[in-house]
Image (spheres, rainbow, N blue to C red):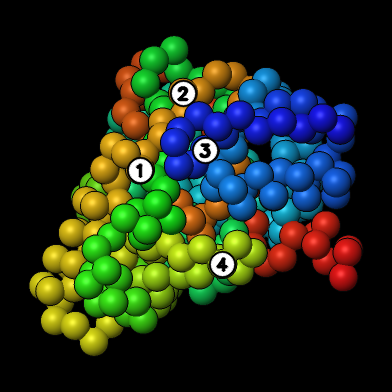
Amino acid sequence: MGIVARPVHPSFAAEIEGVDLKADHGPQVAAAIEAALDTYAVVALRGQNLDDEQQMAFSEQLGELSRALNHGRQPGQQPRLRAELYDISNLDEDGAVLAEEDRRRTWREADKLWHTDRSFVAADTTYSLLTGRVVPPEGADTEFADMRAAWDALPEDMKRRIDGLQAEHSVWYSRALAAKTDFREDELNTFPPVPQPLVRTHPRTGRKSLVLASHAYRILGWPEDEGKGLLAELTAFATQARFVHAHKWTPGDLVIWDNRTTMHRGTSFDDKRWRRDMRRTTVQGPARHAMAAE
């Protein structure tokens, strides 16, 4: 196993070479990739061309698979993908580009906001793994922000001010920010707001990171306007160009990131013209290879 990580940004993000996950997705490979994630927070593996079963099998080495509700569908409308896969596409259940009036198109507008996957649930969400099955010929990059480097660069008085604070996160807040959406009661009941720390220490590396996302809408114990102002200030600081890396997709890519140390967002493309089929697995809890070693 000759896995090599090649940095693509001064503070984070790397491309990994020397591994074919179709042939080897066992615990040794998973441990090596998780070690790379400890250093780089985001890793890209080009040309993997994984199918659903292969993507899920490797993801399970990194933690327990979470299940996607894939909101935005009309009552009785079946999801395009199985529940272990998050549908990050502009396609309907027949594989055609979503109609302009399709509710799922509005729902996915929030993917263009800076966010952290599943910060609106209480589970310990760790890694996300996104595969590019069909990639538009232009646009549709994924941008990542290094929340460790952003924390390190904050003035000391700001660090003292925010360490120990909590923010409340809600997926409905971010969806309403992105586009006008009428949420049904059955949808609202699936994800009540949850608190998250504003500063988190990574359990494997001990490094501190900011915990921000478009899902965060208030600071607990603060007046609403002051809390929103602080969140906006920190987000603007953390998404400066010096902390951001953009992944330009090619078909077959697999990109993995640590949700505890990054934010990300999708960039625009002509989504009424070009098909985009991206499938994400997201895991929580300890990695299987780590549990096997205990």
Residue mark closest to the camera, 4 vs 2: 4
Task: Inspect the image, locate mark 3, and give the three-letter code of the amino acid beneath it.
Answer: Ala
Distance from disc 4 to disc 2, alpha carbons, whole Å, reads 30 Å
Residue mark closest to the camera, 4 vs 3: 4
Task: Inspect the image, locate mark 2, and give the three-letter code of the amino acid beneath it.
Answer: Lys
User: Foreground: 271 or 33?
Assistant: 33
User: Foreground: 61 or 83?
Assistant: 61
Task: Inspect the image, locate mark 4, and give the three-letter code of the amino acid beneath it.
Answer: Gly
Task: Inspect the image, locate mark 1, and give the three-letter code of the amino acid beneath it.
Answer: Phe
Image position, residue 282 (x, y; %) = 61, 52
The residue under label 3 is 13
Residue mark closest to the camera, 3 vs 2: 3
Please identify the quadrant where the N terminus is shown: top right
Q: Earlier in the sequence, mark 1 or mark 4?
A: 4
Q: Earlier in the sequence, mark 1 or mark 3?
A: 3
Disc 4 residue crowd, few under 14, some 14–19, many 20+, Cα 10 Å:
few
- Residue occupying the point 26% across, 43% down: 240
Q: Which mark is residue 248?
A: 2
Whether tag 3 and tag 2 are in contact, CB under 8 A, the answer is no
Q: Which mark is residue 206?
A: 4
Distance from disc 3 to disc 2, alpha carbons, whole Å, reads 13 Å
Whether tag 1 and tag 2 are in contact, CB under 8 A, the answer is no
The residue under label 1 is 243
Image position, residue 167 (x, y; %) = 32, 74
Residue lying farthest to the bottom in this orientation: 221
